[in-house]
């Protein structure tokens, strides 16, 4: 007997057939403006070519491949036919970075004639004194444009349509094949020297599953040759990691472009290394309280073991994932609370002296709709608090500010029923929290120590109420959840927008690592931050934005540290400069100000205050 589609599945399938988004429907697909064969795309491409040719003529540049330096954290969705209005033609790519910092640069290439085999070579960067910033400190990737659901770029909600969007940062752009005629993504699986392709953009009704952790599906370790399509833009991402002891100064070098074995141009690179390292972020105007930098999920060792099925491979990928997290500013990943996982955090240099995203050994009492805990319940909670304390004392040497959770989005009755056991944990410095809404404050703010808030990062009234309760960690986990690919939005959301409005915790929902099919969910997008494959995690624009958000907070923390030093001095000019910096911080509009400009201004004040501090020491 043939299996029938459900009514819901049939409706979804019909919608996709009508939209031309299934394999075998190329004619309607060509009407999609994303398709290079569409009239709209061709019109844009012709206009772009005319602009670029004119720029090249004016600049005296004679090459088939031309470049624009562009902002890596931009609202612009850089598709093949989108002109880089923020781009600087034939200009150097630049970075301004502290010692030890990772900082992105980006450029786009435009090919007047199609090229199939384009490669790149990055030189060492040198300053005028001959100091070297090695080429190995610059990591270059191609920005892969592929199909995601119709709510691409600005939303985490699901949609049955598919549209192109830039997202993946790849060493090998052919790891994922995109067919614009069929409106489809395919994963390349390489085994025994042969490539096969798996359809990974099927409608949910037709989805058969895809094991992204299988051997043969992985990115390259070095940047592979790329294809440049005629009259289309292609974006590249270059991340410089400045060594901690790098001599401050301006370093210059080049990225040489080779096409079909011939030199096709040179992109200048300039990196200014600042004379300081960045601290971990601390709470705005309360510098003795660290900011928690986390995301729900993504870093459980048990998950890696389950996915890879091989202990050696799982452990290798787990270590790589944690190193990647630390490099992206996630200093408090949500790991399994086991002796093994905590030891790995310590070995990798994560801060483990508190706060730390932990867990408690509480039994679940299930008073979801109210009631009272019995004497036995309370004694069980007291025992759980002691057990939690003993566990962290054994493996971390302390139990101070272990941030734990009990329940999720609970109502007033639940809070009232359970809040009395929180005191047992607080006696050991362990904080109990719950994600949710207003009921948690009105019924339990006096007992909670951590609160992921179901609201916007700049919900200042809600944040202020919680912060007024004393030493507490409060952040957002919605409005929006993860899922958007827009790096400018995500940098703002995770960084200064919440930070300057009193939030001191990043713990959004969630750090999903798949699926690779954006149509796999019904209500929400899969909320992927970084994509799992056999080689580990694939970076994305949104993951880079998280790092920039954290670094914005780190720069602001350093500036406030310098301000406090100045205000404690007896030098009036020094104090006055510090107050100017305070005035600048006070007038920032974190929802609308340009964050690159905000960071640059913070750096100016940091350098001024440090210079004045050094002059005082010499005096």
Image (cartoon, grey):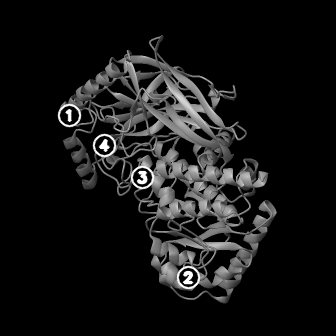
Q: Quadrant of residue 118?
A: top left
Under circle 2, the secondary element is helix
Task: List the residue tagged with mark 1.
Answer: 40
Q: Is residue 1 above or below residue 228?
A: below
Residue in the image at 60% along x and 42% along y: 97
Mark 4 or mark 2, whichever is nearer to me: 2
Residue 174 vs residue 66, the one in the foreground: 66
Task: List the residue tagged with mark 4.
Answer: 162
Name which of mark 4 and mark 3 comes first in the sequence: 4
In the picture, the disc for residue 218 is none
Residue in the image at 70% along x and 28% along y: 131
Instruction: Assess disc 2: are there few (<14), some (14-19) or many (≥20) residues with their C-alpha within 10 Å of its C-alpha.
Output: many
Instruction: Assess disc 3: are there few (<14), some (14-19) or many (≥20) residues with their C-alpha within 10 Å of its C-alpha.
Output: many
Under circle 3, the secondary element is helix
Please state the horizontal and vertical placement of residue 595, each as a whole percent of the image.
47, 51
The CA distance from mark 1 to mark 2 is 56 Å
The CA distance from mark 4 to mark 2 is 44 Å
Please indicate, yes or no, whether residue 298 appears anywhere in the rendered image.
no
Mark 4 or mark 3, whichever is nearer to me: 3
Task: List the residue tagged with mark 2.
Answer: 444
Under circle 4, the secondary element is strand
Name which of mark 4 and mark 2 comes first in the sequence: 4
Q: In the rendered view of the protein, which quadrant contains the C terminus? A: bottom right
The CA distance from mark 1 to mark 4 is 17 Å
The CA distance from mark 1 to mark 3 is 27 Å
Q: Is residue 364 above or below residue 143?
A: below
Task: List the residue tagged with mark 3.
Answer: 489
Please state the horizontal and vertical placement of residue 456, each as a whole percent of the image.
43, 65
Q: In the rendered view of the protein, which quadrant contains the N terminus? A: top left
**Left or right: 77 as drawn, with respect to 382:** left
Name which of mark 1 and mark 2 comes first in the sequence: 1
């Amino acid at each position: 007997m043939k299996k029938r589609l459900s009514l819901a599945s049939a409706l979804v399938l019909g919608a996709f057939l009508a939209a031309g988004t299934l394999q075998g429907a190329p004619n309607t697909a060509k009407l999609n403006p994303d398709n290079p064969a569409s009239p709209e795309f061709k019109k844009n491409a012709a206009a772009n070519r005319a602009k670029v040719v004119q720029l090249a003529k004016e600049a005296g540049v004679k090459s088939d491949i031309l470049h624009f330096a562009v902002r890596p954290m931009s609202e612009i969705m850089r598709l093949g036919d989108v002109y880089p209005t923020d781009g600087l033609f034939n200009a150097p790519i630049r970075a301004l970075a502290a010692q030890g910092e990772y900082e992105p640069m980006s450029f786009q290439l435009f090919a007047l004639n199609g090229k199939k085999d384009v490669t790149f070579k990055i030189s060492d960067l040198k300053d005028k004194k001959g100091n070297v910033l090695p080429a190995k400190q610059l990591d270059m990737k191609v920005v892969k444009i592929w199909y995601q659901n119709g709510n691409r770029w600005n939303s985490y909600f699901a949609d049955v349509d598919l549209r192109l969007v830039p997202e993946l940062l790849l060493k090998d752009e052919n790891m994922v094949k995109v067919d614009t005629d069929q409106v489809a993504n395919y994963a390349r699986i390489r085994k025994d020297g042969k490539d096969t392709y798996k359809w990974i953009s099927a409608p949910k009704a037709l989805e058969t599953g895809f094991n992204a952790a299988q051997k043969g599906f992985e990115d390259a370790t070095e940047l592979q040759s790329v294809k440049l399509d005629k009259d289309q833009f292609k974006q590249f991402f270059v991340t410089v990691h400045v060594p901690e002891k790098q001599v401050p100064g301006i370093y210059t070098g080049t990225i040489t472009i080779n096409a079909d074995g011939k030199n096709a141009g040179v992109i200048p690179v300039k990196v200014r290394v600042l004379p300081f390292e960045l601290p971990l972020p601390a709470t705005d105007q309360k510098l003795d309280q660290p900011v928690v930098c986390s995301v729900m999920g993504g870093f459980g060792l048990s998950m890696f073991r389950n996915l890879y099925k091989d202990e050696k491979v799982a452990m290798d990928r787990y270590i790589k994932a944690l190193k990647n997290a630390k490099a992206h500013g996630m200093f408090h990943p949500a790991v399994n609370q086991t002796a093994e996982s905590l030891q790995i955090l310590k070995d990798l240099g994560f801060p483990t002296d508190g706060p730390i995203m932990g867990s408690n050994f509480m039994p679940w009492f299930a008073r979801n709709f109210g009631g009272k805990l019995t004497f036995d319940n309370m004694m069980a909670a007291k025992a759980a608090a002691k057990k939690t304390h003993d566990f962290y004392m054994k493996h971390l040497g302390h139990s101070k500010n272990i941030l734990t959770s009990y329940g999720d989005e609970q109502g007033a009755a639940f809070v009232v029923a359970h809040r009395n056991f929180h005191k047992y944990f607080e006696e050991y410095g362990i904080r109990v929290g719950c994600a949710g809404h207003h009921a948690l404050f009105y019924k339990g703010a006096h007992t909670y120590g951590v609160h992921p808030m179901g609201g916007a990062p700049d919900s200042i009234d809600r944040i202020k109420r919680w912060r007024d309760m004393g030493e507490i960690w409060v952040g957002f986990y919605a409005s929006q959840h993860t899922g958007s690919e827009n790096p400018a939005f995500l940098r703002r959301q995770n960084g200064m927008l919440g930070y300057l409005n009193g939030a001191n915790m990043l713990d959004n929902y969630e750090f999903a690592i798949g699926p690779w099919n954006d149509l796999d969910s019904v209500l929400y997008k899969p909320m992927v931050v970084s994509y799992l494959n056999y080689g580990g995690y694939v970076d994305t624009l949104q993951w880079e934005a998280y790092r920039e958000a954290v670094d914005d907070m780190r720069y602001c923390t350093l500036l406030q540290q310098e301000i406090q030093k100045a205000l404690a001095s007896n030098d009036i000019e020094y104090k006055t400069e510090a107050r100017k910096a305070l005035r600048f911080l006070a007038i920032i509009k974190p929802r609308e100000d340009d964050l690159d400009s905000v960071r640059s201004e913070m750096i100016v004040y940091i350098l001024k205050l440090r210079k004045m501090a050094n002059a005082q020491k010499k005096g």
